[in-house]
Amino acid sequence: LSPRREKPFVAINCSAIPESLLETELFGHAKGAFTGASDKKVGLFETADGGTLFLDEIADLSLPLQAKILRVLQERKLKRVGENAYRDFDVRIITATHKNLISEVKGNRFREDLYYRLNVIPIHLSPLRERIEDIVPLVDYFLKKHSTMTGEPMKKLAPETIEFLLRQKWRGNVRELEN
């Protein structure tokens, strides 16, 4: 129901991109800002302008990059790498992590001020093994998704297969179930 629903939804897995590239992915860069920057690049904050930016695995960011993100969130302005001009942007930020951020803050691995800036509406999602009622709907969703991707007819699992799935520990949570 958000007025942002028709606007961009941009997601990035912060742990999947090398630290050296993550800053330009998020904030963009100017042409010639560094070796290999042959064109300007619009960052994900700008790409998501008016919409939502989802930062997955936020706890894996380095402390210097956390400081830059904190400043951008506080100022609601960003500067592309290699530029002097600041740009306004308007995004909703959603973050996720598999780590306990309170423990990360106490261990000085996550900035406390960034934690409180992001922790506006916390949503704790229990692991899949604690919500087995979600397994069958998720299986149906993944079967339909992969059927559409491959062009194959949708398969239906036998009741004994469903029973087997319901008995698993799912240490890898939903990703393990999908695989």
Image (cartoon, helix red, strand yellow):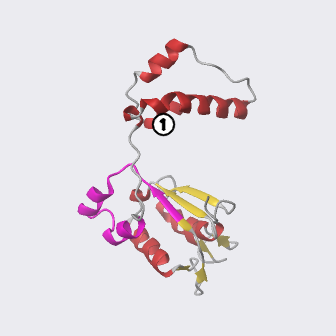
Front one among 101 and 79: 101
Q: Is residue 105 magenta?
A: yes
> Which residue is most to the left?
106
Q: Secondary structure at mark 1?
A: helix
Looking at this view, is 159 or 113 the one in front?
159
Residue extending furthest toward the bottom: 84
- In the rendering, at what x and y percent does residue 39 appear? 70, 72
Hey, which residue is sitting farthest right in the picture?
151
| Stretch in magenta | 93-118
Query: In the rendering, at what x and y percent does residue 72 appear?
Result: 49, 76
Q: Left or right of 106: which side holds 131?
A: right
Mark 1 closeness class: few <14, some 14–19, many ≥20 residues within 10 Å: some
Figure quadrant of residue 27 = bottom right
Q: Quadrant of the N terminus?
A: bottom right
Residue at x-position 66% and y-position 61%: 8
Tell me if residue 53 is in the magenta stretch: no
Measuring from the top left, give residue 165's x and y in whole percent. Answer: 46, 22
Which quadrant would residue 90 be assigned to in this image? bottom right
Q: Which residue position holds label 1? A: 174
Q: Residue at coordinates 42% horizontally, 66% vertically from top-left?
A: 118
Observer able to see residue 179: no
Query: Residue 108 placed where, x, y %?
Result: 27, 64
Q: Residue at x 41, y 65 (%)?
A: 120
Residue 178 lies left or right of residue 151; in this view the side is: left
Residue 64 visible (yes or no): yes
Type of the residue with mark 1: Val
Q: Quadrant of residue 35?
A: bottom right
